[in-house]
Amino acid sequence: MAKNRVKSGGFTGAVSPWWIALTGLFLVVFFVLPIVNNLLNTNDLATLAKQRPMSFYYHKLFFDPYYIRIVFDTVALSVGVTVICIIIGYPVAMFLVRHSGRWSGLVIFLLIAPLLTSIIMRTFGWRVLFARRGLVNDFLLWADILDKPFMFLNSASSAVVGLVHVLVPFMVLSIASVLRSIDLQLEESARILGASRIKTFLRVTFPLSLDGIGTGFIIVFLLANGSFVTLLLLGGGDLKTLPLLIYQQFTISRDFQFAAAMSNVLLAIAVGCLYLQLRLIRRKGVKGAA
Amino acid sequence: MLLYVVLFFIFLLGPILIVVAISFTETEYVAFPPKGFSLRWYERFFEYDAFVDSFIVSVELAFATAVLGVGLGVPAALAVTRGNVPFANSIMTFLLSPLSMPLIVMGFALLFYLSALGLGVSFLSLLIAHTVISLPYVVRTVAGVYRGISPDFEESAAVLGANRFQIFWNVTLPMIKPGIFAGMLFAMLISIDNLPISFFFGSADTNTLPVVMLSYLEHQFDPSIAAASCIQLIVAVIGLFIVERIYGLDAMTPAS
Amino acid sequence: MSRSKRWIHSSVVGSALLFSGMGTVSAEEITVTSFGGIWETAITNCYAAEYEKRTGHKANVMIGSPAQWMSQIEANPDNPPIDVIVSTQSQTVAAGEGGLISRATAKEIPNLADVDPLFIGAVDGWGACFDFGAFVIAYNKDTVKNPPTSIKEFVNRTIAGDWVASFPSITYGIMPDIIWSFADLYGGSADNVDPAFEVFKKIKDSGNAIAWASVTDFLNQMSTGDADIGMYWDGRAFSFIDKGNDWMGVVKPTDKAFMSCVAMNKSKGAPDAAWEYLNIVFEPGPMSCFSDYLNYGVTNQKVQYSEKMKDRITFPKDLRAPSTATSRKIAESAADWIERWNKEIGM
């Protein structure tokens, strides 16, 4: 960090570095310690269900095929949703940055507006759309794609759609902010040198925007990883993930120890992802977009 | 491409508009297209104490979280960015780490931890929990804005003899105002719609609106949820409109 | 003041005001619970209103499910966020033995003296059930011309595809008890629920069943035509019909419907004001008010039923009710059954 040292007069910033200690302490006490507490599981969590050692639960999670499936599904769902968001969101980001012109304010507003609504509102809307007699089935029947209404609400597809719906604005904004900073001259030069539109995109624009995709990927993945409301209201019985099971433990089965074990596994997935982020995403130091 | 974008926005906004439509239905049950036109579900919102009380709690909590988040986050963000602190990168990562934690794990862990500490299910616990998760948004936004400002202004002030506080108050603060504002807005949005954390802290005076709505939805699926959602949306839009007037939306879209 | 100063100033002042004016629940104000739908209307109008009239303090009514409330009490035993908890037989036994609720006898709740001992025994002395209902078959008279007369017939015809039927989903709080009742019906017991799982597997595989997650969900499904018939609580079905939905019909199955009785208890750390509320709950006047709304039987023997009710209530001797020992077994096994259901059936 010596490169950051100011050239004139040893100016060390407008605030004393000791403020970090205060905030840091707050986070340690109320963020790190609760997680550690949960890991060590020192709480006396007894219900009428038998008290079992934590190893019993971890064994279940890692060796029982049903639970292995769930852990796998948790990660697979998050990855799948993220990829779909990239595919759907990239064109919108392009449009926003390159073609919207004076409408860009409106586009941004329309992107942010859903984030102002409660996630319950959005999920509720999808429930109505996907009902046996809802608009989606009506449309598919009318278009002759189906001849009997499909029980979307009982299948994972409705949950995936719901999650994509909630998370795609984050992806668009991440990609857009990086796209914005790409120097248009680079693309122009490529065109002048004879590259086609597609080639310019593939060779120049896309690689330069990878950073935005990466940031968006992390954000969306982590959010999808921890979400349970969408799965609770839309997935039917079909798709189960760790967050949903944790919620169910708390509201139905009341096996808190199991919930604690599951939450630690979920945490491990998140930490793993965070670690990958630190290693793979090009770090520009404190000055970069974190 | 324009067609694609239009379809995209129909996809994005469709469900929301549907909910708005449903909130006006006359029927007892959720019907789309809505049958008849009635404000009974809005009346219901005000009749069911839990809705109103939790809405008030949600708003109070959002404000408190924003204030506490800014109080804790702004100085730290500034100090890490330009304070010549050793391991600044790692500290920044640490400050932003709550972003990566699955919220349901945070909620679960915080509930038992805070109960063990004696704080239990209380507004203070909720506030602490919400602040922990909104802090990274404040820090990131403020740091981002601060980075974009040339250090020359502050240095000149230092050279001219201003002390630290004067520099902060008269030079830095006015320049990072949009960042603080954006950070506060994010903190409030995160807090108001938060479910996974608030869920664990449910009680008559600490229920937030999303928690009550979820419980209601699970146990009584009727159009009052639609009405409650719309009321929440209206309040949020009014808030955003006020902010837009004062600062302009574009200035606030961060490189998030 | 400069703009930023004004903002900071008002935020600080504003938050100070908010903090000071913040609602702390006053001493005699209590938080009581209720199931959703018509239940909530009844509890609010019959019990909470009465409590407020007599004590001048509010009884805040919260909708949810017993398991959720129990979790919340458990996480905060010294200062429980819930003062009066509603729960089924098995859940009451679980709550009692888990140390979440206080023992209640006629000493704490005088009106318990008039309650049918059957309902006190049903929850092993942890207070008493205050209402009871039967899990019967509700159907759409327009689409189901020839309704089944027994549960077994209903199940067989669902599998055969006579209609689309709706069953409670596993997330419904009383489902473990219902699983037991199916086991009991098909020759099993609380120790052997295999018969129930076999039956439900066949139902699920037939593709003619959907699940209702909440009590109003079922009514929605019937109203929109998503389901033609289903298993549902008699009281709630009658209340729904009374509202003008005379297209719905109710069948009291000949092979003993499942009886569920619901108890209300004071959580251990709750203030004594809760006893006052509970006494109102078991008093004849408010009880018959509740019964009128919900068309359920109530347990204070001094309650006089109206004519229409006499026809509607099915009494315990004609129903399949779990004994205390069975309730305890259900409470102990609930988590395992739920897990098994998730693995094998998934509805």
Image (cartoon, helix red, strand yellow):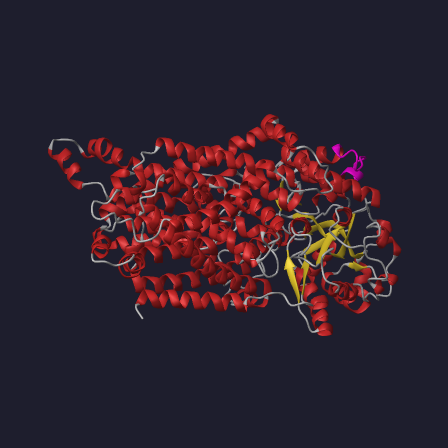
The answer to which image quadrant residue B158 occupies is bottom left
C188 is within the stretch colored magenta: yes
**Which portion, as a residue range, is magenta?**
C183-194
Of C148 and B164, the residue lying toward us = B164
Figure quadrant of residue A62: top right
- Would you say C28 lies left or right of A178 here? right
Whether residue A161 can be seen here: no
Q: Residue furthest left?
A: A192
Tally of numbered discs: 0
Q: Residue at x 86, y 61 (%)?
A: C106
Residue C290: % across, % down: 74, 64
Q: Is residue B181 above or below residue B47?
A: above
Dividing the picture into quadrants, the one containing residue B47 is: bottom right
| Residue at 41%, 65% in the rendered image | C11
Does the image show residue A73?
yes
Viewed as shown, does residue B173 lie left or right of A84? left
Q: Is residue B74 magenta?
A: no
Look at the image and tell me in which quarter the C terminus of chain C lies.
top right
* Residue A127 locus on image (x, y percent): 51, 49
Q: Residue C219 vs residue A100: left or right?
A: right
Q: Quadrant of the N terminus of chain C?
A: bottom left
Give above or below for C166 relative to B180: above
Measured from the top left, where is residue C191 in percent x and y? 79, 34
x%, y% of residue A24? 44, 46
Prevailing secondary structure class for the magenta stretch in the rendered image: loop
Q: Nearer the viewer, residue C216 or C247?
A: C216
